[in-house]
Image (cartoon, rainbow, N blue to C red):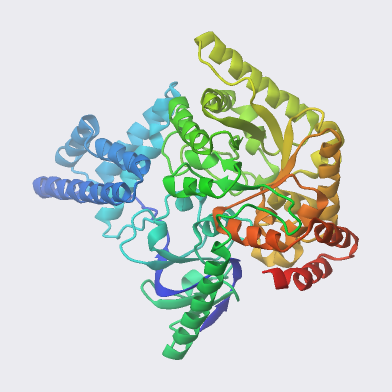
């Protein structure tokens, strides 16, 4: 059987299906006969032992993969599992109140969850998510349901899910994921972005696929043509193997350009920067091939964690990245949560239109201490390199001035503590809301630089939910209006002698990148997986030709015509 989807990260894979549906336990009130209390206690102890072994195995795998920070989360869970106060209460409820182990676990954990939720200390309140996670683990084991955990897969699999949260992708065991398939999501969803950065084939928006596949079933994914084949026969598998071989050969040819400078055919150098989601050694390996960090998505520090990262934890991560890049600029985007990005360690309000809601910079304004903690950590780390701080979801000059005020407050707090920071930190904004793009001439006088977030700019300019696969045809990255808007931003900042980069998915798209070069972009920023391909494109492109492409892209009447024109012009270079 064949199913179609949106190919958002190129590649081909054949393997077993891993249906990822996180277990949600249902606690049911239950009693035991008085004489069965000893057996129930013994069963409770067996649940503890099984949970302890699961946690130990997850820690072993994470540590073996060099993910010591993630392993610490599960060490904390083990401590909760054997907390003396809770353990004693659970045993009492089984032995004296004759509750089933499951109901006793539920009652005691919920009691402590309520207590901690009322605590005034933020750090204590943040333990709530840890307690809930451990409780769910015990109840899942009691129900005999095997664990579904993308951080510790046992074998290479094709992960099939309704959707993947950023917290899921943040802990993904990338070595064992052959491909990602989801029922929802588009080319600019975080699942897609992470898949591309990890070079994992991804097919999103495959309607109802969870109900059509079975766990362990064999499937073939073509994330170039946008097809998934269930139970492929030998002939189909042979065809997929050939296509995979051709794809890997093309990718190997592109990778020859990875260590080369980003030089155009006429000698023009267009700096290529890196989009980062973490400070892992694997991601920082891109420092050898790029001119800086155009976007560090700091929200990934917060994802997959049960509590907010401390100032010290953030400082160490920022320091590691800045040190790795030396004098080259590192652009740190402040916490960008909301829309399609949620946190385990933070309760966000349910909104009808989350992409238009209290997200990113707006959310930071409403949580001043969280914002100031991040800014202090970043400023402390600035002495170790060339730090640029960038604010997301800026819609007005009021936003810019208010955000700059927070920076000044953070500086004063550090000065009061006698903590040094660099006086040369540059302050910039994301251009992703049309309102700020249209007053780019005024914004350019307020900040040192700008970076265009093309994913959201496209979404807001075309009024399309970029996460809705049913609206795929309306989300037009090559819409001439977008290129006109981007051109205006670049021209406005150029008049003030200030740089503009692109850090959205357009930066790593060779067809769009050629137009951006012609519009006068200062630098392109992208995931490491796109760097070699963009360098190859640039090597065969002159600035004169890029300007010709940009002029045409702004004058053609439709996005489809722009896309067809660019592909016809640029295909020979790729």
> Residue shown at 39%/35% (left/top)?
128
Evaluate whether residue 152 shows in this view.
yes
Left or right side of 10 for 262: right
In this view, the residue in front, 32 or 447, is 447
Q: Position of residue 354 (x, y in %)?
A: 65, 46
Q: Position of residue 374 (x, y in %)?
A: 54, 28
Evaluate whether residue 462 shows in this view.
no
Q: Position of residue 116 (x, y in %)?
A: 38, 28
Seen from this angle, which residue lies furthest front? Answer: 267
Image quadrant where residue 92 sits? top left
Q: Is residue 182 above or below residue 1?
A: above
Q: Is residue 131 above or below residue 530?
A: above
Left or right side of 342 for 363: right
> Residue shown at 88%/62% (left/top)?
552
Left or right side of 392 for 195: left
> Residue shown at 42%/54% (left/top)?
172
Count of marks placed on residues: 0
Q: Is residue 256 above or below residue 171?
A: below
Q: Position of residue 514 (x, y in %)?
A: 75, 59
Image quadrant where residue 491 sits? top right
The quarter of the image holding the C terminus is bottom right
């Amino acid at each position: 059987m064949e199913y179609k989807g949106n190919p958002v990260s190129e590649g081909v894979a054949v393997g077993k299906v891993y249906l990822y549906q996180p277990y949600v336990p249902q606690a049911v009130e239950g009693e035991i006969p008085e004489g069965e209390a000893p057996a129930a206690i013994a069963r409770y102890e067996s649940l503890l032992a099984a949970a302890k072994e699961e946690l130990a195995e997850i820690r072993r795998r994470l540590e073996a993969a060099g993910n010591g920070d993630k392993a610490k989360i599960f060490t904390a869970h083990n401590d909760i599992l054997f907390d003396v106060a809770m353990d004693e209460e659970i045993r009492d409820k089984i032995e004296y109140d004759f509750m089933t182990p499951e109901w006793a676990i539920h009652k005691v954990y919920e009691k402590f969850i309520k207590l901690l939720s009322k605590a005034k200390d933020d750090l204590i309140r943040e333990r709530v998510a840890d307690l809930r996670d451990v409780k769910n683990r015990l109840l899942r084991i009691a129900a005999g349901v095997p664990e579904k955990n993308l951080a510790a897969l046992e074998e290479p699999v094709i992960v099939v899910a309704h959707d993947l949260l950023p917290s899921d992708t943040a802990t993904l065991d990338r070595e064992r994921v052959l491909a990602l398939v989801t029922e929802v999501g588009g080319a600019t969803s975080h699942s897609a972005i992470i898949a591309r950065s990890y070079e994992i084939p991804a097919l999103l928006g495959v309607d109802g696929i969870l109900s059509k596949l079975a766990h362990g079933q064999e499937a073939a994914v073509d994330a170039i043509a946008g097809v998934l084949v269930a139970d492929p026969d030998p002939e189909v598998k042979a065809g997929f193997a050939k296509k995979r071989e051709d794809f890997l050969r093309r990718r190997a040819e592109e990778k020859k350009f990875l260590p080369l400078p980003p030089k155009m055919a006429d000698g023009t150098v267009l700096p290529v920067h890196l989009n980062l989601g973490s400070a892992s050694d694997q991601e920082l390996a891109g420092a050898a091939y790029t001119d800086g960090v155009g976007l560090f998505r700091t929200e990934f520090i917060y994802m997959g964690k049960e509590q907010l990262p401390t100032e010290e934890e953030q400082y160490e991560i920022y320091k590691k990245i800045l040190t790795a890049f030396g004098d080259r600029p590192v652009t740190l985007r402040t916490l960008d949560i909301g829309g399609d990005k949620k946190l385990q360690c933070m309760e966000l309000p349910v909104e009808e239109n989350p992409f238009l809601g209290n997200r990113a910079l707006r959310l930071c304004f409403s949580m001043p201490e969280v914002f100031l903690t991040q800014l202090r950590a970043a400023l402390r780390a600035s002495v170790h390199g060339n730090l640029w701080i960038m604010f997301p979801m800026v819609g007005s000059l009021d936003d810019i001035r208010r955000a700059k005020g927070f920076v000044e407050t953070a500086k004063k707090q550090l000065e009061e503590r006698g903590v040094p920071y660099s006086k040369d930190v540059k302050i910039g904004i994301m251009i992703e809301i049309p309102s700020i793009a249209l007053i780019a001439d005024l914004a350019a006088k307020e900040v040192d630089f700008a970076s265009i977030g093309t994913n959201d700019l496209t979404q807001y300019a075309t009024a399309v939910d970029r996460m809705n696969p049913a609206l795929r045809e309306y989300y037009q990255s090559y819409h001439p209006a977008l290129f006109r808007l981007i051109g205006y931003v670049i021209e406005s900042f150029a008049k003030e002698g200030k740089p503009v980069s692109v850090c959205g998915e357009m930066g790593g798209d060779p067809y769009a990148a050629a137009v951006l070069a012609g519009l006068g972009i200062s630098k392109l920023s992208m995931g490491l997986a796109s760097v070699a391909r963009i360098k190859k494109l640039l090597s065969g492109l002159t600035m004169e030709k890029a300007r010709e492409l940009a002029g045409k892209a702004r004058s053609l009447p439709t996005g489809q015509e722009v896309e067809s024109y660019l592909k016809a012009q640029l295909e020979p270079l790729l």
